[in-house]
Structures are given as structure tokens and as C-alpha cells.
Image (cartoon, grey):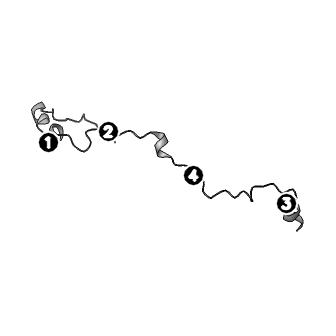
Amino acid sequence: MTHGTQPRQTPPEDPEAASSSPAVSSPGRFSRLPERIRPEDTVETKPATVPDPARDTYNPDEWLIRYCG
């Protein structure tokens, strides 16, 4: 079974009709790009929790408490 393809016929555009259409004559919703946003403005960094200085101090006997206690 063979299928034949025929070129699609599109009607030629009328330049007078295109210039008088409301989408072309007045600026629409998509007539310009949105304002550019800098990458620095898209990211906010802040610590998840307040750092606890007592927790981050080194304890040389911590391994004794963890594994032997």
C-alpha cells in the first residue's frame, strides 16, 4: 500500500489585510520581551539555622563519649 503526499497549498497573504489587523496595528500582549533579570537577583542566600559556636568547637574526648559511653 503506497501513500501519496501532495504539497500543502496555503493561500497567499494579503498585505493590506495584514496591516489592518488589530494584532499588528496596536501593541499587544506579546509585542516586546519582558525586562531582563540579572542572575544575582534570582538567588538569595542565608543560613538555614543560626550557627551554634558551642557545637562546632573541637572536643578531643568526643570519640570516647560516642563509642565507649
In the depicted view, which residue is nearer to us: 2 or 50?
50
State which mark lies toward you, 2 or 1: 2
- CA neighbours of label 3 inside 10 A, class few (<14), some (14 to 19), many (20+): few
Instruction: Name the amino acid type tagged 4.
Output: Lys
Taking 55 as reference, is 31 left or right?
Answer: left
Front one among 35 and 18: 35
Q: Is residue 6 left or right of residue 20?
A: right
Image quadrant assignment for residue 57: bottom right
At mark 2, the secondary structure is loop
> Label 2, on which residue?
33
In the picture shown, does residue 26 fall above or below 55? above
Picture quarter with the N terminus: top left
Question: How dense is the environment of label 1, judged by Cα within 10 Å: few (below 14), some, or many (20 and up)?
Answer: few
Camera-near label (1 vs 3) is 3
Q: Residue at x 12, y 31 (%)?
A: 15
Disc 1 and disc 4: Cα gap in Å? 49 Å
Please state the horizontal and vertical placement of residue 51, each as a whole percent of the image: 67, 56
Task: Looking at the image, tell me whether mark 2 or mark 1 is earlier in sequence order.
Answer: 1
Gap between marks 2 and 3, in whole Å?
Answer: 59 Å
Q: What residue does disc 1 label?
A: 22
Q: Are marks 2 and 4 in contact (CB under 8 Å)?
A: no
**Residue at point 16% right, 35% down?**
11
- The CA distance from mark 2 to mark 4 is 31 Å
At numbered mark 1, what does the secondary structure look like: helix, strand or loop?
Answer: helix
Which image quadrant is residue 14 in? top left
Quadrant position of the C terminus in the picture: bottom right
Mark 2 or mark 4: name the one nearer the start of the chain.
2
* Relative to 30, 21 lies left or right: left
Q: Mark 1 or mark 3: name the one nearer the start of the chain.
A: 1
The residue tagged 3 is 62
The residue under the point 9% across, 32% down is 16
